[in-house]
């Protein structure tokens, strides 16, 4: 099975975690996050087998509303950021890497960076089993560092140091087989010429990295010149890179593993996006701003390329907003994408949209899911500022239990909820 794992990037401070659970198919739209009705996922014994399952609401530019996730418990075991193909969950707690073999019910310390400044920002474990740890933080002057833990987990090796910025847990990283892509992120300091705009690549499963892209500033009128997301597209063997902000925005791609680059249009022509997800028949972008939702470009085969920003339909699927307030201030965060058969395009992508803390009134977070990049299902919606969905881990397969873990990685207290992704593709 070809496995695909993502972690997105976030520029925010202390974090906490949430296990996410799904309570099965619902006839109504998702309830509020703190509704813990135990009967929400139970089948109605009065329904006969002949009763048809209700069709999900949605379509015509809106996601389908069919499912509901429910907060069950609260724990504080550090913040989970990654899950490997053995269902071991990796997390961060200050300068320590912590692990869990029971889906974050209990954790133990794996390694601590005793002599480092900053904190563990992210942990990435590709199929090679190498444990890649990003250390840094926005409050530290030196650039973030990328380390590999030794096989016996008693020491670490520096693989790369960014000039400025850091790898976070909610954007800018992806693995596929032996490919590992990481990028840094930080608010730009134009006066000092400092920008979180480096992309690095490993083709040996995380044993070594090299820089492949560092876009120059196009506009100092834009808030930032930094990387928003990286993607490995196995259908085209292509690297995609999303850049922000505004006048510096761009979508880059490379068909020769970073040796040369093409762009979709002039800088600033494409809207700001913070997630790129490549499907067999299309490439989708998660938006960074209003209207919140999914942009989509339908491609004619793996060698096809977009010619202009308008090739991406905006917005292909728009997240439903409060009819009395359309300023939700969401942006797409760390997606999770598994691919089980490239020829058939059997794949599943989960993409959270979390509110922007810079918007004082924003409070919604939403989890979308798709198996083709065309139709998207809203699996969960929070309607409280207490929970900010920033990444999702799992499932590892589209068969079986389809267990997953949602993480609130930006708040001081977190919610952990066990559950599964409903098989809406059957």
Image: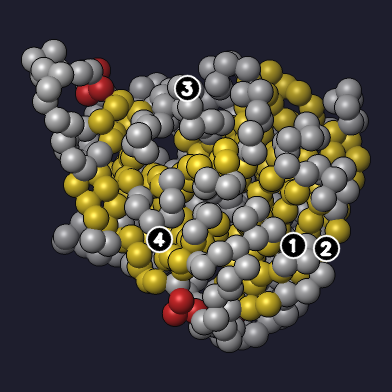
The answer to whether mark 1 and mark 2 are in CB contact below 8 A is: yes
> Disc 2 or 3, which lies upstream in sequence?
2
Mark 1–mark 3 CB contact (< 8 Å):
no
Instruction: Say whether residue 391 is visible.
Output: no
Is residue 418 among what the camera can see?
yes
Q: How far apart are marks 4 and 1 (CA)?
A: 24 Å
Kind of element beneath mark 1: strand
Q: Is residue 156 above or below residue 186?
A: above
First of labels 1, 2 by sequence position: 1
Q: Mark 1 points at which residue?
A: 199
From the viewer's perspective, is 21 left or right of 252?
A: left
Q: Where 151 sits versus 366, above or below?
A: above
Task: Point out residue 326 in the picture as x, y percentages from the top left corner.
Answer: 25, 64
Name the residue at 23% across, 61% down: 60
- Which residue is under mark 2? 211
Q: In which quarter of the image is the N terminus?
A: top right
Which corner quadrant of the image does residue 245 belong to? bottom right
Disc 3 crowd rating (10 Å Cα; few below 14, some 14-19, many 20+) is few
Looking at marks 1 and 3 on the same chain, the residue that comes earlier in the sequence is marked by 1
Residue placed under numbered mark 4 in the picture: 294
Q: How far apart are marks 1 and 3 (CA)?
A: 36 Å
Query: Label 3: which residue?
Result: 400
């Amino acid at each position: 099975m070809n496995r695909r794992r993502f972690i997105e990037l976030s520029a925010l401070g202390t974090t906490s975690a949430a296990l996410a659970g799904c309570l099965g198919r619902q006839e109504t739209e998702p309830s509020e996050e703190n509704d813990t009705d135990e009967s929400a996922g139970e089948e109605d014994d009065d329904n006969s087998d002949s009763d048809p399952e209700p069709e999900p609401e949605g379509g015509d530019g809106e996601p389908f509303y069919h499912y509901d996730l429910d907060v069950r418990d609260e724990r504080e075991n550090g913040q989970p950021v990654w899950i490997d193909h053995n269902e071991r969950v990796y997390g961060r707690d200050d300068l320590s890497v912590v692990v869990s073999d029971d889906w974050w019910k209990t954790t133990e310390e794996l390694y601590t960076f005793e002599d480092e400044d900053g904190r563990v920002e992210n942990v990435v474990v590709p199929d090679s089993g190498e444990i890649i740890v990003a250390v840094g933080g926005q409050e530290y002057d030196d650039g973030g560092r990328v380390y590999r833990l030794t096989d016996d987990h008693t020491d670490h090796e520096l693989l790369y140091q960014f000039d400025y910025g850091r790898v976070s847990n909610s954007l800018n990283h992806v693995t596929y087989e032996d490919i590992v892509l990481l990028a840094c992120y930080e608010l730009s300091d134009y006066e000092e010429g400092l920008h979180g705009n480096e992309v690095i690549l490993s083709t040996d499963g995380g044993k070594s990295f090299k820089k492949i892209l560092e876009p120059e500033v196009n506009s100092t009128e834009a808030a930032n010149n930094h990387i928003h997301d990286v993607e490995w597209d196995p259908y085209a063997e292509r690297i995609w890179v999303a850049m922000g902000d505004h006048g510096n925005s761009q979508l880059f791609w490379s068909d020769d593993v970073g040796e040369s680059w093409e762009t979709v249009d002039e800088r600033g022509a494409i809207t700001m996006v913070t997630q790129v997800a490549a499907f067999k028949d299309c490439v989708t972008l998660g938006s960074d701003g209003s209207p919140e939702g999914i942009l989509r470009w339908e491609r004619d085969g793996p060698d096809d390329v977009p010619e202009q920003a308008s090739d991406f339909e905006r917005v292909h699927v728009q997240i439903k907003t409060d009819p009395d307030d359309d300023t939700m201030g969401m942006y797409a965060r760390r997606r999770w994408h598994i691919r089980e058969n490239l020829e058939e395009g059997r794949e599943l992508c989960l993409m959270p949209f979390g509110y922007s803390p810079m918007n004082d009134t924003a409070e919604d977070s939403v989890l979308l899911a798709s198996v083709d990049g065309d139709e998207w299902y809203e699996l969960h919606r929070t309607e409280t500022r207490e929970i900010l969905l920033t990444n999702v881990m799992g499932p590892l397969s589209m068969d079986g239990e389809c267990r997953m873990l949602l993480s609130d990685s930006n708040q001081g207290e977190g919610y952990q909820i066990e559950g599964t992704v409903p098989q809406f593709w059957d």
